[in-house]
Image (tube, rainbow, N blue to C red):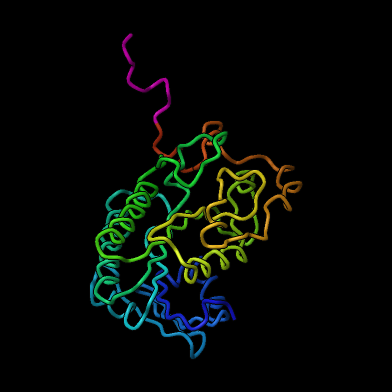
Amino acid sequence: MSEAAGIRVALSGAGGQIGAVLRPRLIAAGIVLRSGGGPTALTPLSEAETVTTGDLRDPEAVDRLLAGTEVLVHLAGTSVEKPLPEVIENNLIALHAVYEGARRHGLRRVVFASSNHAFGMHSVDDRLAIDAPFRPDGAYGLSKAWGELMGQMYWDRHGIEGVALRIGSALPRPTEFRHLSTWLGHDDLTQLVLRSIAAPVPGTIAVWGASNNPRSYWDNSAAAAVIGYRPTQSAEDYAEEILARENPLDPIARTLQGGSFTTMDYTPEAERPRREG
């Protein structure tokens, strides 16, 4: 059992890709889990898990998810680039409803699934510290920057601790060139979330969600110092295989940390407004 054993945790987005990975692992770590699958009816994995359904824009659905819990791991929402109205509904309005629910129920902490795409327009030649400025690569990344700031506001105004996980590429294994810098293996994902649930934090913090990748875009030393996250997986173990393949990104996307997200609806330099002088 981990030091998170016995903590009562709500997991939103439990039916999604990352939620499906975490549910059995959190239960195995001894967490008393309350999983929300949105509109999807989930089947409890064990007696240690309770499941709920409902749209998180609805306060009653939020109340069902958060009842009796101490910590929320918030994964629910739009997780890829989508039209702005959808992003606003799921990643802004629903997120606000969730934080208000956390306040109603007296939760002590929200672990928020942020994203590397809040920083996607930084160059691949930059190595970002945890206090790097936001440079979102689209509406999705912009919503994650907003979400991180909401976590700060709810700490400042209401005393709810916050951990923002700037998740990279959470996959069973890296499969393309960009993943050599951004991969987050499932074992490291689990460790990161467990540490974010249980470790003492000074109000609000952000950490990069990445494995121990030598080519990483991000300096994650703060995660080790503050919450004790020490990843054991590395994308470099797959480098020879990946480097033998063609990089699937277009020439501009190869230069920016957000990869393919950066050139969706992108205005080429030649078509941008000209600056006088």
Is 200 within the magenta?
no
> Observer-nearest residue: 147 or 254?
147
Quarter in which the C terminus is drawn: top left
Is 269 within the magenta?
yes
Instruction: Please report the bounds of the magenta region as a residue range.
Output: 267-277
Query: Residue at 51% of width from left, 59% of height from top?
Result: 226
Report whether 145 appears left or right of 210: left
Query: Residue at 67% of width from left, 60% of height from top?
Result: 232
Instruction: Find the residue positioned furthest to the top.
Output: 277
Name which quarter of the figure residue 77 lies in.
Answer: bottom left
Residue 277 lies, with reference to residue 76, above or below; the image says: above
Report whether 44 appears left or right of 83: right
Residue 214: % across, % down? 67, 46
Q: Main secondary structure of the magenta part?
A: loop
Q: Give the mark count.
A: 0
Report whether 271 appears left or right of 193: left
Residue 30: % across, % down? 54, 83
Instruction: Find the residue positioned furthest to the right.
Output: 240
Residue 264 lies, with reference to residue 75, above or below; the image says: above
> Observer-nearest residue: 134 or 224?
224
Name which quarter of the figure residue 231 lies in.
Answer: bottom right
Residue 99: % across, % down? 29, 66
> Observer-nearest residue: 165 or 53?
165
Query: Residue at 65% of width from left, 43% of height from top?
Result: 215
Query: Residue at 29% of width from left, 75% of height from top?
Result: 106
Quarter in which the N terminus is drawn: bottom right
Instruction: Find the residue positioned furthest to the bottom.
Output: 47
Residue 229 lies, with reference to residue 20, above or below; the image says: above
Residue 186: % across, % down? 60, 64
Report whether 18 appears left or right of 211: left
